[in-house]
Image: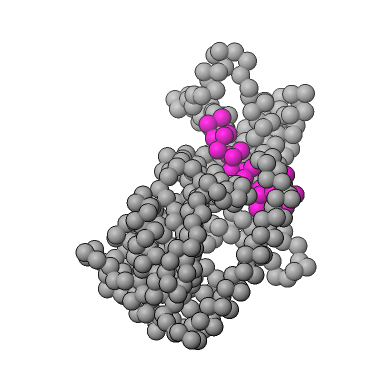
Amino acid sequence: MKKLFHQLHLWLSIPLGIVITIICFSGAMLVFEKEITECVQHDIYFVKEVKNTPLPIDSLMCKVTPTLNEGVSITGVTVSSDPERCYKVNLSKPRRTAIYVDQYTGEVKGSSSRLPFFNTMFRLHRWLLDSKDGDNDIFWGKKIVGISTLLFVVILITGVILWWPKSKKAWKNLFTIHLREGWKRFLYDLHVVGGVYAIVFLLAMALTGLTWSYPWYRNAFYSLFGVEQSVQKADTEGKKETNREGKANKNHTDVRKIAEPQSPYLHWQDVYEFVAQENSDYKQITISNGSANVSFNRIGNQRASDNYKFDNQTGHITQHTYYSDSSQRSKLRGWIYSVHVGNWGGMVTRILAFMAALLGATLPLTGYYLWIKRLYKKNRK
């Protein structure tokens, strides 16, 4: 049986090793993308001077609107608990576009954009720089990443089985990287011991990452955690019903606006102040048309948030949904992302995820070395 595991470990690693190295390395590079981007583009994300009181949100939006291109509108604003951070103003198009505004002066600082290096790393991590030209074309980059990640799980598990210690001395050596016994021993330890140190994070990142590659795997993963397909369908139908109601409410609001025109941002400041007062430990609050979303500085699901609904005409809060009352599907989706990127435990787990991904990138390379060394010895004999 051990011989079978050895063959699986070896002959899966040889053709997929380089791809696995690319996936792990590019993933490690993305862990601290936000911090690096904000450091490089500091003037966009942070204000020049913190003053006593920010301008009201409706006044800021009125200053921003004339600067937008024709056909582009404001869809929401995100306010951070950090007074040094600029307000993030979300735009209708292009998709996921935002600009940053100094809340004390109304100055538009600039738009957010992914740095070219991180854009390349992201495309490497997800698609090996491939792109899909048409609906009928095979997305080879995505398929190769999915297959490699799935088989990487098998490689990791067979590796653990192969090097599972059989004695107390072996257990001690399993956690020790020898630095003074030459390069050969160091590379061997880096492959075996490095794999042991990184195994938990690598398996967690691989198993969660597969949910973006295969619908069948995603459904099975959700079912494993008690989110059945029928529940997912109900959630989808519920969203559709909510969208229909939203459209109806929007049409109704439009009629009222004709009769009583007013700024669409008139009550955003009042709503923000109310939500901030109710949630003193908030991380950031996002106000949009009829809704407010508040996230927190807490360990766990980093996409966890409470949601408020309010009347656009009066600013009165009409509904409050706690994160604990949200759907299991929504919670699981947030946990999958948080575990995959390693931010579920704050900076500590992010650093560990970064180191694990780097170790994961070295495993195929050190494995190639050990394999070639063994072939060389065998040929000499």
Residue 226 is one of the magenta-drawn residues: no
| Residue 36 visible to an observer of this rendering | no
Q: Position of residue 340 (x, y in %)?
A: 56, 46
Q: Position of residue 292 (x, y in %)?
A: 46, 62
Q: Position of residue 265 (x, y in %)?
A: 41, 75
Q: Where, by quadrant of the figure, is residue 377 drawn? A: top right
Along the line of sight, the residue nearer the viewer: 196 or 82: 82
Residue at 44% from the left image edge and 53% from the top image edge: 295
168 versus 378 height, above or below: above
Residue at 69% from the left image edge and 31% from the top image edge: 158
Farthest-out residue, top: 168
Q: Where, by quadrant of the figure, is residue 107 drawn? A: bottom left
From the viewer's perspective, tell me whether residue 282 is left or right of residue 162: left
Q: Quadrant of the N terminus?
A: top right
Residue at 28% from the left image edge and 67% from the top image edge: 54
From the viewer's perspective, tell me whether residue 215 is left or right of residue 97: right
Farthest-out residue, left: 52
Q: Main secondary structure of the magenta part?
A: helix
Along the line of sight, the residue nearer the viewer: 63 or 174: 63
From the viewer's perspective, tell me whether residue 371 is left or right of residue 46: right
Residue segment shown in magenta: 196-220
Along the line of sight, the residue nearer the viewer: 220 or 277: 277
Q: Position of residue 186 (x, y in %)?
A: 51, 29
Residue 204 is one of the magenta-drawn residues: yes
